[in-house]
Structures are given as C-alpha cells and as structure tokens.
Amino acid sequence: MKDNRYDARTFAVRLKATMENMDKEVKKSRLAEQLYKHYAATAIPKGIHCLSLRLTDEYSSNAHARKQLPPPELLPLLSDNSFQHYILASDNILAASVVVSSTVRSSSVPHKVVFHVITDKKTYPGMHSWFALNSISPAIVEVKGVHQFDWLTRENVPVLEAIENHRGVRNHYHGDHGAVSSVSDNPRVLASKLQARSPKYISLLNHLRIYLPELFPNLNKVVFLDDDIVIQRDLSPLWKINLEGKVNGAVETCRGEDNWNLKSGLTLWKFGTLPPALIAFRGHVHGIDPSWHMLGLGYQENTDIESVRRSAVIHYNGWR
C-alpha cells in the first residue's frame, strides 16, 4: 500500500507538471498567433510598397503630377465657410485616397466638399501626385506638407518634445518593460502594446488635430478624419449639429471595458495624441450620436455587424 500511495503521489506530481507545461505551450501558441496576425496586418504587398516611390518619381518627371492643387481659380474656396471642410493628416497615400474617395462618394453635396490633406515632407511629392493625377471632382482637394506651414515650429509644438523627454526618462529608469508582451496577455492588451510602440504616435502628423485653429484660422468648423476609416454615410448633417459652445464634437468611446489596462505603465495611455488631447479638450467636448462613429474594429469584442452597417464612419484601429 505504501508503494502504491507513493506511486500515486508521484504520478499526480508528474501529471500536474505535464499539464502546466502544456498550458504554457498553449499560451505561447496563442501569443504567436496574435503576433503573426499583427505582422500580416502591417505587411505591405510589394506593389503597394513601391506606390509612394513611383508617385514621387512621377512628381519629378510629370508636369501634370505637379499641377497646383486646387487650381488658382478655386483657391478662395479653401477658406469659404459655406463649404464643408475636412482635414486629413496622413503619410499613407493609399489610406488617404480611401478616406477622401469614400467621403466624396457618400456625400449628398460633393460639390461642397473641400479636403485639406496634410502629410510629411517625405511623402508630400507622392501624395500630391496621387491627387493631381486622380481627380475627385467636383470635390476640392488641397495637399500640403508640414514643412509648408510656417507656424509649425518646435517652439509652437512643445508637446512633441515633452513626449520624447518623458519616453527617454521612462526608458532610462524603468526600461521598456511596458511594451514587452506576455503569454498571459489577451489579444486586446497585446494589440495596445504593439500599437504603442509604433513611431507614428510621436510624429508631428499625429498631433496636428490639437493645433487646427492655428493652422486654419479662417475656418469656423472642420471635420478631422483619421486615415484608418471608411465613410459609409453622408457626413453633411455634422455641420448642423449645435456644439453648445464646445470646441470638439465626438462620439464617446470609453465604455468602461478597459479595466484590464488600469495599471502602472499602461500602454493604452502611451499613444501619442491621447494624453495631450485629453488635456487640451477636457471640458470642451460635445458628445454626438454613436451611430456616427464605429470605433475599435479589429480588436473590440462583441462587435455587432448591424451597428457596423448603420455607422457613418467605420474605424479599423485594431491590428496594425
């Protein structure tokens, strides 16, 4: 009996160890699956990867690709408040094209649509070429590089230096542990960690929304669009919304579902624009109907397909 009890105990210990090892392997496999999804989503087909280079070459060799946007006779409309002005800041030519074209196609008054596309100095030739060679008439498109705004200096945009200094101090004293993935992370946590490491979140383009009044002082109302969205419905009614003295109209997206990330060094709040924007617009946001903006596609759990279909804007900000 003693030998049998000993054998049973040993068997139980070994079985437990085997189960623990198997559990670790399953978690590693799940983590690898999420990482592969991330890499697949961020990978760019060769043809598209070369698009920017080809358009930049077109800009230097084709006079039509360098034509003024918009034509001189339409320049006064860039500051005409009777038109619907949209602002898009992006260094992704293909994504910018999708946003602009879907907005115009969904509009009930496309002849009243004016797009102000802002990009970085490197992407400017390619972005300009695309919209010069691919007209979205009757809408109007202006393409400008950040280097063409005299106001955009490091002295006028101190938030960039503040974020860079904070990141440097954090990494010096604490390392970059907050960005390290763990096998215990669920997909949403892993998604936020991978996104937080993207350099786009400390780029100037990502902070322009805070400085729109300085960049477009003659415009009374604009709609700022991200480059990872598709417009499904006419946005014209947005101009009729009474903001009741607020400066920002937006769909409330904090639904109390992110208690998993309420911890020290959380990555959700490391996204470049989020902390400065929360400070800049605190108390100045007017909530609008949720049907205007479906956020979280790609990571938000329990997404209702009917809600997606009804939304004016669908926003894929999941795996990158």
Image (cartoon, rainbow, N blue to C red):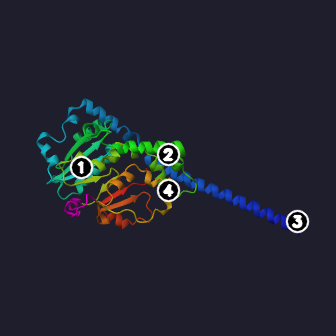
Q: Is residue 134 visible?
A: no
Residue labelled with disc 4: 189
Q: What amino acid type should be assigned to the residue bearing mark 1? A: Pro
Distance from Cα at disc 3 to Cα at disc 2: 57 Å
Which of the two labelled residues, at mark 3 and mark 1, occupies the earlier sequence position?
Answer: 3
Residues marked 1 and 2 touching at CB (< 8 Å): no
Q: Residues within 10 Å of mark 3 (few under 14, many from 20)?
A: few
Q: Position of residue 256 (x, y in %)?
A: 43, 66
First in sequence: mark 1 vs mark 2: 2
Residue occupied by mark 3 = 3
Closer mark to the observer between disc 3 and disc 2? 2
Tag 4, which secondary structure?
helix
**Identity of the amino acid at label 4?**
Val
Instruction: Measure the alpha-carbon separation of dots 3 and 1.
Output: 82 Å
Toward the left, the furthest residue is 73
Residue at (52%, 58%) from the top-left corner? Answer: 186
Q: Amino acid at mark 3?
A: Asp
Relative to 58, is 275 above or below? below
Q: Quadrant of the N terminus?
A: bottom right
Q: Secondary structure at mark 3?
A: helix
**Nearer the observer, 133 or 67:** 67
Q: Position of residue 152 (x, y in %)?
A: 28, 40
